[in-house]
């Protein structure tokens, strides 16, 4: 039985966004939390890569968001995500058409200079035509420069791309792209490829804007100094079930990066002929999203002193909830990021509300609206964690802790743990979610110790206060 969850506060969204989300929910007979959480992803899509929000001297947040609406089959997920992203799809197509000639010209120039470089090398090698080594080097520099200046067709959106393709798209689009999927195939992509490739890092670093470098045999490397990745996903509950047991998701912190909306089904009591979205509401929403996409402004957004006071209070409140007696203790990977996510949401609301977001600090009421949204989504995250197997992860952590206590030492290796849990875990990766949970709860700490020659070995230190 799913716990009673709070309604998404659509009135906390910018007026054009909230009005459209409400009308869309009515027209599609879907729960408002579906349109609500996906609207946040749309706002992130318009602003990521151009703005950041500065909180203190060394704390800033990019404006990327990973949002996922969870609903059973037949809940019109595709219709909702399609309506919300339609202005972006139109804008992307118009930009591609307008820039088509420049794209073709840049590719033709790069191709011509590459051929000129190859011809210069051939002439120099044959000793004919008076071509010097300096001529060859100059041709190589020109060809390389033209290659780096190739203009690619404009992309705002991507689908269930592989991590390798996603890295290409991020580099080609200046470091920002948004993944949209109405079936959740991206989760399968991550989970299925993790054991073969370390490119799960792209989903971790794309959320935090940490530099990405991908080296591949036979292909030029990808280097994205400041990647910005957002995701708008709708999935069925079965997609989420069991994800906590995947070391790539819980163990490496992917689960904690998503904003979840556990959508309550209206099937069985939907209106047969609901009113459509009013034309004026749709037009204002479309104009708002297109204005934000076309905006060329960029820079750092700050908090007003009053907004920062709201932030401080909310951060203090959250900190207590992360403690041993708090309701976020068993999902610290999510709760530990929640204040930063609230700040990202506040900045996105501010950008939509304000014509000059970098010139005007975020006011207190906008910060309060962001925390009200985050509080609603905290309840939904708890339900999502339960569905994903958070309770099972806790059980595994308790089992592993009992085995560590039986060992009795201050230090233990993963190899030791496999021996102690023989028959329960097949390989060390299987116990990673449980180890991460114990580490988050401060029962253990992982360090690397040098073993003479070779790579340092990971050692698990037991908190002496727990013995």
Image (spheres, rainbow, N blue to C red):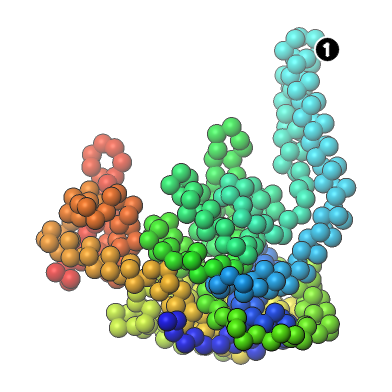
Q: Give how far across and how far down residue 314 sits, in percent.
A: 47, 85
Quarter of the rendering containing residue 92: bottom right
Q: Residue at x 84, y 82 (%)?
A: 279
Residue at point 62% right, 72% down?
74
Counting the numbered discs, the total is 1
Q: For the point 55% across and 44% down, which residue is it?
A: 214
Is 256 left or right of 300, judged from the image as shown?
left
Q: Classify residue 8 as left or right of residue 26.
A: left
- Residue 139 percent across, percent down from the top left: 76, 27
The percent position of residue 291, horizontal first and vertical second, equals 79, 73
Q: Is residue 155 above or below residue 402?
A: above
Residue 436 in sight: yes
Q: Nearer the viewer, residue 1 or 366?
A: 1
Q: Is residue 377 above or below residue 154?
A: below
Quadrant housing residue 272: bottom right
Near-viewer residue (53 or 65):
65
Of the 4 image quadrants, the one containing the N terminus is bottom left
Residue tagged 1 = 129
- SS under mark 1: loop
| Residue 396 figure quarter | bottom left
Identify which residue is drawn at 57% across, 62% down.
184
How many other residues sit within 10 Å of disc 1, few (<14), some (14-19) or many (≥20)? few
Q: Position of residue 123 (x, y in %)?
A: 78, 14
Q: Specify the farthest residue to the top.
A: 127
In which quadrant is the C terminus drawn?
bottom left
Q: Nearer the viewer, residue 13 or 315?
A: 13
Does residue 362 appear in this view?
no
């Amino acid at each position: 039985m799913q716990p009673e969850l709070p309604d998404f506060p659509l009135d906390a969204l910018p007026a054009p966004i909230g009005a459209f989300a409400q009308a869309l929910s009515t027209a599609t007979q879907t729960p408002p939390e579906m349109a609500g959480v996906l609207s946040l992803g749309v706002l992130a899509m318009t602003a990521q890569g151009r703005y950041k929000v500065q909180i203190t001297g060394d704390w800033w947040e990019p404006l990327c968001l990973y949002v996922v609406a969870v609903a059973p089959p037949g809940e019109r997920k595709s219709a909702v995500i399609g309506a919300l992203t339609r202005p972006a799809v139109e804008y992307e197509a118009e930009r591609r058409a307008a820039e088509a000639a420049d794209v073709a010209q840049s590719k033709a120039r790069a191709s011509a200079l590459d051929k000129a470089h190859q011809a210069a090398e051939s002439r120099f090698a044959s000793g004919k035509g008076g071509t010097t080594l300096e001529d060859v080097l100059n041709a190589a520099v020109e060809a390389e420069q033209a290659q780096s200046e190739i203009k690619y067709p404009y992309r705002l959106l991507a689908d269930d791309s592989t991590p390798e393709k996603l890295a290409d798209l991020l580099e080609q689009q200046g470091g920002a792209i948004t993944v949209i999927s109405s079936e959740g195939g991206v989760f399968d992509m991550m989970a299925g490829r993790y054991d073969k490739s370390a490119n799960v890092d792209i989903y971790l670093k794309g959320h935090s804007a940490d530099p990405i470098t991908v080296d591949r045999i036979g292909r030029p490397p990808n280097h994205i100094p400041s990647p910005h990745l957002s995701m708008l996903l709708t999935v069925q509950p079965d997609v989420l079930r069991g994800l906590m047991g995947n070391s790539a998701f819980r163990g490496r912190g992917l689960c904690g990066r998503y904003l979840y909306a556990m959508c309550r089904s209206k099937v069985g009591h939907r209106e047969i002929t609901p009113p459509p979205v009013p034309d004026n509401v749709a037009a204002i929403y479309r104009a708002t999203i297109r204005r934000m996409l076309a905006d060329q402004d960029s820079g750092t957004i700050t908090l007003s002193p009053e907004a920062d006071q709201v932030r401080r209070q909310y951060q203090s409140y959250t900190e207590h909830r992360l403690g041993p007696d708090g309701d976020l203790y068993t999902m610290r990977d999510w709760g530990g990021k929640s204040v930063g996510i609230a700040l990202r949401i506040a900045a996105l609301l501010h950008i939509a509300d304000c014509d000059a977001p970098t010139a005007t600090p975020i006011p207190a009421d906008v910060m309060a609206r962001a925390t009200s949204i985050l509080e609603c989504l905290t309840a939904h995250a708890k339900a999502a964690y339960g569905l994903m197997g958070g309770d099972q992860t806790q059980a595994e952590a308790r089992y592993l802790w009992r085995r560590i206590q039986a060992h009795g030492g201050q230090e233990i290796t993963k190899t030791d743990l496999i021996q102690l849990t023989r028959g329960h875990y097949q390989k060390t990766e299987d116990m990673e979610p449980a180890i991460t949970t114990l580490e988050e709860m401060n029962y253990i700490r992982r360090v690397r110790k040098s073993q003479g020659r070779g790579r340092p070995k990971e050692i698990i230190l037991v908190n002496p206060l727990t013995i």
